[in-house]
Image (cartoon, rainbow, N blue to C red):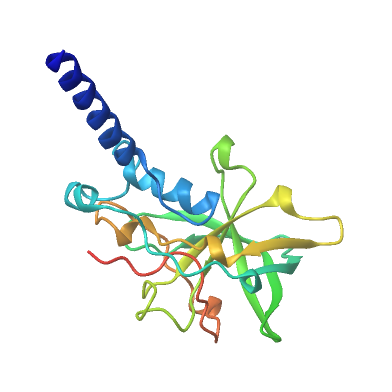
Amino acid sequence: MKNILLLIFILTLCSCIDKGKRTVFGDSDYQKELNATFKDASKSPLTKKGLKKFKGLDFFPILAKYKVVAKIIKTADAPTFSFPTTTDRVVMYKKYGVVYFSIDKKDFELAIYQEENPKLTYMNNLFLPFLDKTNGKTSYEGGRFIDVLTTDETENGTIIIDFNEAYNPYCVYSNRYSCPITPRENYLDIEIKAGVMAYKK
């Protein structure tokens, strides 16, 4: 009888520990999915050391004002150009257009880009890098990125941009990655306290 009780106790303890390992933190589906990716050794951009001590990314609080409806003006016949990166790697992009939006009653604009000859799974992806006044303080000094889809454009030429889903380039987490460098023209003269915060190594 004692052996049976001991076995039940061990199985229960193992079950609790296993569940604890699978816990993924986050205040939104986006945050939970991002943390799950970082915890998965087969997908994570973290180094082995970083992965070992990883407990979850630091995020700014989610605020509705950082999810904006932007007017998008497309750039006709935009030339393809070599986008600068953190290494010698060459990536080719073209300027897809400019997005116009407001935060705290202030007007802003950002250039948005599209990769040349993207893989089929990324055909609808647009690349929105930006800099702001939090860089080098509470967010990564080199700026952050937001993914936008062409399929999210409305008939009246607007698109949702959610700064709460801003993330760091992978080269923040490991030097094995090469990342596009955010253009200075995409600087926002405001603190964007949204999305992923600076990574503490």
Name the one closer to the observer, 147 or 14: 14
Q: Quadrant for the C terminus, please.
A: bottom left
Write down the quadrant of residue 122 in the picture: top right
Name the one closer to the observer, 54 or 156: 54
Vertical side of 10 occupied by 41: above or below: below
Q: Residue 162: x and y, percent?
A: 61, 63
Name the one closer to the observer, 15 or 167: 15
Q: Residue 27: x and y, percent?
A: 50, 57
- Residue 74 appears left or right of 115: right
- Residue 47 appears left or right of 159: left
Q: Residue at x 47, y 46 (%)?
A: 33
Write down the quadrant of residue 19 in the picture: top left
Write down the quadrant of residue 43 in the picture: top left
Vertical side of 17 occupied by 161: above or below: below
- Residue 85 appears left or right of 150: left
- Outermost left residue: 3
Q: Residue at x 43, y 71 (%)?
A: 143
- Outermost front residue: 1
Whether residue 87 is visible here, answered yes or no, is no
Q: Residue 153: x and y, percent?
A: 76, 55
Q: Quadrant for the N terminus, please.
A: top left
Whether residue 178 is visible here, answered yes or no, is yes
Figure label count: 0
Q: Residue at x 71, y 86 (%)?
A: 105
Q: Residue at x 24, y 48 (%)?
A: 51
Q: Residue 66: x and y, percent?
A: 61, 71
Vertical side of 61 occupied by 117: above or below: above
